[in-house]
Amino acid sequence: MQDIEEIEKKLLSQVSTTNTPRDVLKSPDLKQLYGAIKSIADEQRSAYGKRINDLKLSLESSILKREADLDNAAVESIDVTAPWDINSVQVNLLPTNLGSQHPLTVEIENVADIFTRMGFEAIESRQIDDDYHMFGSLNFPENHPARDGYDTFRTEEGFIAPAHTSTMQNRILKAGKAKLESGGQIGVVALGRCFRNEDLDATHEHTFYQYEGVFMSNDANLGQMLGTLRSFFECYYGQSLKIKTQPAYFPFVEPGLEFAIEKPAALGGKPGEWLEMLGCGMIHPNVLLAAGIDPKKYRGFAWGGGIERLVMLKYGIEDIRHFESGKLQFLRKFA
Ligand code: DAH
């Protein structure tokens, strides 16, 4: 029993100094004490068992206390008004090892990286915009019902929180016009946050992310677009995929398509289970004219899709609302 006393002292002192007190329950010393039960003489076994049990209880209670102390200490060290301790003579930043990148940040970088390797330039989309970039430059006529498909948030001054990354098309085209006209191409992907005033459910969130691609040359065609998109999805999911398209209406493309992939078996898909991943098409002549580009000389294609949808399929996430929830339990799965 002398031994037990010593081991107890040692374990309790470990609990009071470590930042992961619960790990002490896995101590080999403790295992050894348990292991010894079988070899104790019959008449002493029950006393021994009780002693070990008491030790375990006292460990548990000091672990709980230590955990509470650590929690309190962590809370105390966070000053929400400044990233440093005002009493310290040294700059004392919050420990970064306690945090991790948000899964969407990681995946946005991943998407940007794939397109960059294909030769596209990746840029960030704007988070506040105007009616012209949201609708007018994209061939939505004034008062056209297609505008109602986008439940946009507006500021009192008339600015718009972009409901899609297509707001970047006119800017991308204008910025690339000179290059295009001197024999080059435009290849840009704009990634960023979008907002819609929607009823929320497992697949609809008011704040979400999209990636918008724009490609222009003097002979761009649908075949190139489908090849580009297929390569992207195959690279993102790391396997070959079946794809299909069906006609869809978007004012800024003609023809306009919805692009679907067959849900990969490795991600729980059954044959014939299609997932619509994005909208795409050949850029409408009016969109090119709005950017001062001659639609008789140059052609292009564009696409726009949701990042959350990509990521949800990749990781089997069942509810889009997890992303904006800030729940540590969710975020830690990606740490
Ligand atoms: N902006 C559309 C949306 O969010 C998606 C889209 C469709 C983008 C077709 C495109 C496109 O660039 O060509 O609903």
Image: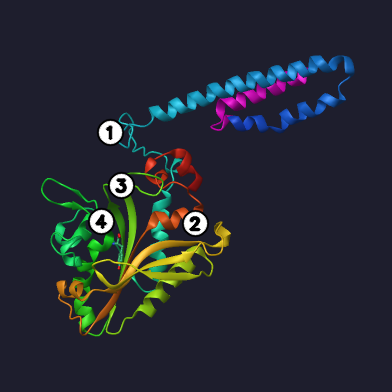
Distance from disc 1 to disc 2, alpha carbons, whole Å, reads: 37 Å
Dots 3, 4 in contact, CB < 8 A: no
Q: Nearer the viewer, mark 1 or mark 2?
A: 2
As shown in the figure, which amino acid type bears the numbered disc 4? Answer: Gly
Q: Which residue is mark 3?
A: 206
Label annotation for residue 314: 2
Of mark 2 and mark 3, the one earlier in the sequence is 3
Q: Nearer the viewer, mark 1 or mark 4?
A: 4
Distance from disc 2 to disc 4, alpha carbons, whole Å, reads: 28 Å
Label annotation for residue 292: none
Q: Which of 110 and 168 lies nearest the eye of the viewer?
A: 168
As shown in the figure, which amino acid type bears the numbered disc 1? Answer: Thr
As shown in the figure, which amino acid type bears the numbered disc 3? Answer: His
Q: Is mark 4 within 8 Å of ligand 1?
A: yes
Q: Secondary structure at mark 3?
A: loop
Of mark 1 and mark 2, the one earlier in the sequence is 1
Question: Can residue 186 be seen?
Answer: no
Of mark 1 and mark 4, the one earlier in the sequence is 1
Q: Which residues are magenta?
A: 1-21
Residue drawn 48% across the image and 49% down it = 317
Q: Which of 316 and 15 lies nearest the eye of the viewer?
A: 316
Residue drawn 42% across the image and 61% down it = 110
Q: Secondary structure at mark 4?
A: helix
Q: Which residue is mark 4?
A: 149
